[in-house]
Image (cartoon, rainbow, N blue to C red):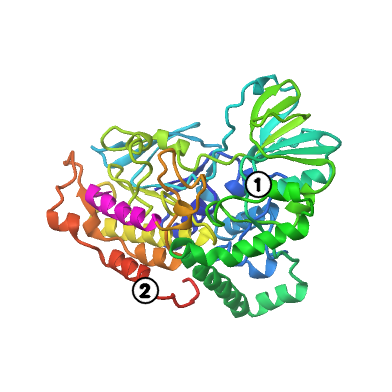
Amino acid sequence: MAVVGAGFSGLGAAVRLGRAGVRDFVVLERAPGVGGTWRDNTYPGCACDVPSLLYSYSFAPHAGRWPRTFSGQRDIRAYLEAVADAEGIGPHLRFGREVLEMRWDSARLHWEITTSRERWTADVAVCAAGPLSEPVIPPIAGLDSFLGPVFHSARWDHTAELRGKRVAVIGTGASAVQLVPALAATAAGVRLFQRTPPWVLPRPDRRVPAAERLLYERLPATAAARRALLWGVRELVTRAFTRLPNALAGYEALARAHLRWAVRDPGLRSRLTPDYRIGCKRILLSSAYYPALVQPHVETIAASLAEVRGRRLIAGDGTRTEADVIVFATGFRATEPPIAHRVTGSDGLTLAETWRDGGMRALRGTSVAGFPNLLMLLGPNTGLGNTSLVLMIESQLDYLLDYLRLLEEYGAAGSVALTPRPAAVRSWNARLDARLGRTVWNTGGCASWYRDAEGRNTTLWPGSTREFRRAVRRVDPGEYARLTPAEAEPEPETETEAETETEAEAETEAEADGGPEPVAPPV
């Protein structure tokens, strides 16, 4: 087996494979260490907006060692490194191996993988490259004429001198909300180019006292109970995002009160007030963002950057300012992952070509028709808007292990492969699209990175993490066709198999139409 990526997904896969007794696998990572997005993002103020007790593996809780309720980048990266060491994953890690191409060999039923250093073959490939791994810098006229440092927040230039400089920040997403207060503390001036204002709630962060950490260490059940409470509250809020957007009115009132309390200038407050429903874009957490924006050396420009002339920056509304450094906080290629151009399936098409018409689609967010024995972690429509992605990752890892169990039942490694039936993929995504149509992400009146260029939401899961866990609890053999080396094509699907509703889908549909879900800790 080959796992591509050593972030939360890839490292979690390595741990679960090791615990399941799988020994012949490698984790191919282009960087020099584990951590994924928590290795790459080193900008000032970088932290997680999900509580640490929930943003960690259930099989490696680390509860008594989190210094804050919302931990920073360094602590999260250190946690992932500690997990790798404790689980003995080191011998499986191959750093400095960027995957250049993955190609399915139908005759030998394996993946041929070319990295920047060598070639590998794998019976099963796990793509854990991550949806937020490739930063985007938009095309700006004259950007190459800028006379100072230019970099993305996810590729922070620590050699650039920022103290006493005029720094322009492009974008107002989660990264910008964290780094603007840090920059305002040292820079001579901060110019924030805001295309769309975000909804911002106070961040209930605090240092965890030594006594509380000791309690978690001595009585792990207390940490588990708190984790379950954090999970349960977010599960209930999910119903508002996915089924009852009007129920988010209380959060919007809180966000407006937070803005009024921090920003007294009515003109600035007006520029910072969103014109779309809260939740349509990612809700951001910060108690320092608004106080930073009211400082006299911080300027909020209510338009995107349109042109650069030397050190002069020109906004879309004609506003002109000057800067010594430009920092782009403009997000990632979430709906067009670059890895999709490097993976070629059984029909000779890449993932990108397969998804060209209709956007990213997968069966249960994990497997794609025409790409046998390829499983994706945090694939299409597995993202979340308000809780921990680690919950989704762990659910998919259960699916991965059940997939391997099913393969072993069918035959020895290299003698059989599984590929999703196109009808099963269509059925699954039709259900997703129907449910997404009533979510706040689709009806809230905003444009966001959740949706692709065609307007389809290809990133988010329209339900609770409990629903998803049930949907991927087991692999349904009827959703897959078996391949053997003698077969050029998968066995034909029957009308019964194509149209049969699986047990997991039935449970998910029933839960979607039912009442409030009981609060229970994730397994």
Q: Is residue 51 visible?
A: no
Query: Where does the image place residue 65, in percent across and percent down from the top left?
Result: 69, 66
Residue type of the residue flagged with mark 1 = Ser
On the image, the x and y values in percent for residue 168 come to 73, 35
Looking at the image, which is closer to me, 142 or 91? 142
**Residue highlighted by disc 2:** 514
- The location of residue 106, given as percent across then percent down, is 25, 38
Horizontal side of 491 relative to 288 (left or right) equals left
Disc on the earlier residue, 1 or 2:
1
Q: Main secondary structure of the magenta part?
A: helix
Name the mark on residue 175. 1
Residue 184, disc: none
Residue bounds of the magenta highlight: 418-437
Identify which residue, 38 or 353, lies in the foreground: 353
| Viewer-nearest residue: 138 or 265 | 265
Does 111 appear in magenta?
no
